[in-house]
Image (spheres, rainbow, N blue to C red):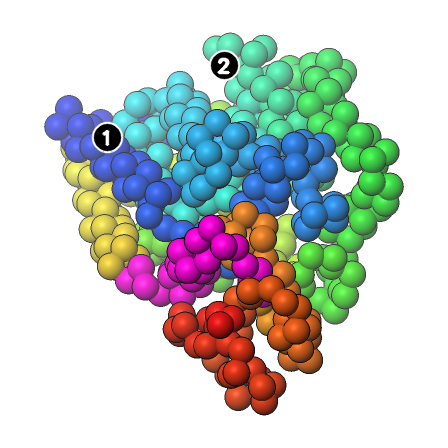
Amino acid sequence: MDKLTHITLTQLQRRWLWGFLALAGILRLVMLFEIPFTDTTEARYAEIARKMVETGDWMTPQFDYGVPFWGKPPLHTWVSALGMKLFGVGQFGARIFIFLTAIATVWMLYAWARSYKGRDYALAGIVILSSTALFYLASATVMTDLVMASGVFLSMAGFYVAVTGHKHARLWSYLFFVGLGIGMLAKGPVAVVLTGIPIGMWVLLKNRWRDTWRQLPWIEGSLLSACIFLPWYVGAEIKTPGFIEYFILGEHWHRFLDSGWTGDLYGHGHAETRGTIWVFWLAAVLPWSFFFLAPLRWGRRVYRGLVIEADGWSLYLLCWALSPMLFFTLATNIIATYVITGLPAACFLVIDLWRFAGEGVQVPKPGVARFYVATVSVAVCLFALVCGAVYVGGASVVKKSQKYLIEDINQMRGTSGGQIYYLDKRYYSAEFYAEGQVHTIESIDGIETILHNDARDFLVIRKSRMDQLPADFDTKFKLQGIYAKDALYYEL
């Protein structure tokens, strides 16, 4: 297998691939400014971060003013809030440090893979990763997943370096525990579980128990990890009693195993058929799905390659890549982003699978290099088409955001002010762009209160409910316009 250890690209090919990464990064940076927050996920987390900046309460993320958000630990909120504190409240501020986290994570993975398999292998892997649908989306989106996944990535890389005794193994062994601390502070125990599953599988299959015990500083490392996340957990429970019980039992047991769970304080579960996580994975790795599956037709060669590798590199990647799907196969409340922790491993593994599949076939090494360039070229073309479609079809994104409606309201009310009301549904994007100055009316009967409150008001309702407005509504309010599925009225 030595002849397949590295791939070789020409200098021109390397420049082309680095150029693609730069272009993809620039395009994603533009999207930070151009794409508004959409409901519900990104707008919700962005609004929680905005409230943190506004209130100055950096200990307790708030679902609403005075209502603690117990659904997730605060690291991702801190990341977005810090960006808005430094660069102003807006899309760029909320997303910029998420984007920089993604860049740092990709660079870390490149350095890790390069130290074992060479620069061309590492470059091909990060190009594949950066062009997958899920990673590209998450790389600058205000969500928990990218920040949590960065901790898992760091732990997985650190463990492998430590156990195999590679260069700087001692440093990487501590980074393993730093990654666990990051995961606990970003999403909780699920990050530790998604790290422990692949490591446990690999250690069992390769019988590396002794190396695992000897090469990692378990006592000092565990203390280091605890120092990262434990102070906040203790502080959160003291400040808002009940957090630990809800977070551990509700978010880490009922959410995944109870399809009828009604205890979610911040929305509703995403009930899916068991096993749907594998379908989500196929969508997450687009446009590379076929390239992952195609080598499996040469199953015997692939199996032999995985088994006889002395360093267990590809087997480690396989365990890592499969772990989120194995863990969430029986879960019912899941979303597509749950597969993100295994994406880097899958993107490096696809290179190895194709190489193992070609073992014994008379294909010259330059031909192998050309294959990688060809596959990446296909990915780039598909990727460019997808990005173009998203950019040109931005109107569909606008329909899921209240940004432009709120901007029109602000222009209409000028310095005279006026209250903004939404009927039935809470829009987090409206709250964000209105700086929290939005009220929700629970039922159609509640409209009577704003008809007689002696203040100028704005009302947003669904078009489908316009015929349910009170009889005297038209004498005091006038229709300003239709915004996708919503109608905007202003008080005369």
Dot 1: element: helix
Sort mark 2 into few (<14), some (14-19) or many (20+) by Cα contacts within 10 Å.
Answer: few
Q: Which residue is mark 2?
A: 166
Q: Observer-nearest residue: 294 or 174?
A: 174
- The mark tally for this picture is 2
The N terminus, quarter of image: top left
Q: In the rendered structure, which amino acid carries the disc numbered 2?
A: His
Determine which residue is flagged by label 1. Answer: 18
Q: Amino acid at mark 1?
A: Trp
Is residue 439 highlighted in magenta? no
Point 20% across, 28% down: residue: 14
Residue 23: tell me if it is visible.
yes
Which residue appears at 48% of the width and 80% of the height?
463
Q: Residues within 10 Å of mark 1 (few under 14, many from 20)?
A: some
Residue 392 vs 220, above or below: the answer is below
- Spatial distance from mark 2 to mark 1, Cα to Cα? 27 Å
Disc on the earlier residue, 2 or 1 = 1
Res. 472 image quadrant: bottom right
- Checking the image for residue 224, the label placed there is none
Spot occupied by residue 419 in the image (x, y as percentages of width and height): 57, 60
Q: Which residues are magenta?
A: 393-421
Quick check: 132 left or right of 432?
left
Is residue 405 placed above or below 181 in the rendered structure? below
351 lies above or below 266:
above
Q: Are the residues at dot 2 and dot 1 in contact (C-beta closer than 8 Å)?
A: no
The residue depicted at 33 percent of the width and 48 percent of the height is 34
